[in-house]
Amino acid sequence: MKLHIDIAVATTGGGLPSRSHIKRWIEAALIASDEARDEVEVSVRLVDDDESRALNHQYRGKDKPTNVLSFPADLPPELELPLLGDLVVCAPVVAREAAEQGKSPEAHWAHMLVHGTLHLLGYDHIDPEDAEIMESLETRILTRLHYPAPYGADDPQQD
């Protein structure tokens, strides 16, 4: 599979993952989900609280910043373009959550990119059955990447 990632940095904060890490995490999610595509394009935008809050309010009706937003491409099948969609990750929220949850920033970034990519692929966690499927897949992906399991008893879904 050929993976193209466009990364836009619109945050002034530090502690951002490298391009190679972002690619590795997205690729791991695509492979583990059995996404059978020859070519995939994903756009990733790393933002601050204000932009995340505005997008979360506009698209989800929630007036607060959030860790990751996923915008699956909704293209007519006849276009046959490799675009999977866009991910918007709020760097300050990821940093705060990692600290609050006692996770390494790298492990939490990995989780957010895997989580967002699975949303682009159609996975969701609205109902308990779907949440169990998605969280199980996230756990498998992250532990294969040598990160701790992302969900614990006191780790509610922040999405």
Image (cartoon, rainbow, N blue to C red):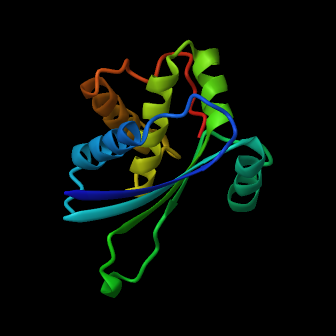
Residue 111's place in the image compared with 116, above or below, is: above
* Drawn side of residue 60 relative to residue 44, left or right: right
* Viewport quadrant of the C terminus: top right
Say which quarter of the image contains residue 81.
bottom left
x and y, in percent, of residue 135 in the image = 40, 34
Q: Residue furthest bottom?
A: 78
* Drawn side of residue 44 relative to residue 76, left or right: right
Say which quarter of the image contains residue 114.
top left
Residue 64's place in the image compared with 108, above or below, is: below
Pick whichever, 33 or 15, lies toward us. Answer: 15
Pick whichever, 135 or 43, lies toward us. Answer: 43
* Viewport quadrant of the N terminus: bottom left
Say which quarter of the image contains residue 92.
top right
Pick whichever, 46 or 52, lies toward us. Answer: 46
x and y, in percent, of residue 3 in the image = 29, 57
Residue drawn at (58%, 16%), measured in percent from left and top?
A: 101
Residue 129 at least partly seen: no
Q: Residue furthest top?
A: 102
Residue 123's place in the image compared with 93, above or below, is: below
Residue 36 at least partly seen: yes
Pick whichever, 26 or 119, lies toward us. Answer: 26
Residue drawn at (35%, 40%), measured in percent from left and top?
A: 20
x and y, in percent, of residue 6 in the image = 45, 58
Number of marks in the image?
0
x and y, in percent, of residue 13 in the image = 67, 34
Residue drawn at (41%, 44%), measured in percent from left and top?
A: 130
Residue 58's place in the image compared with 88, above or below, is: below
Residue drawn at (61%, 39%), measured in percent from left and top?
A: 67
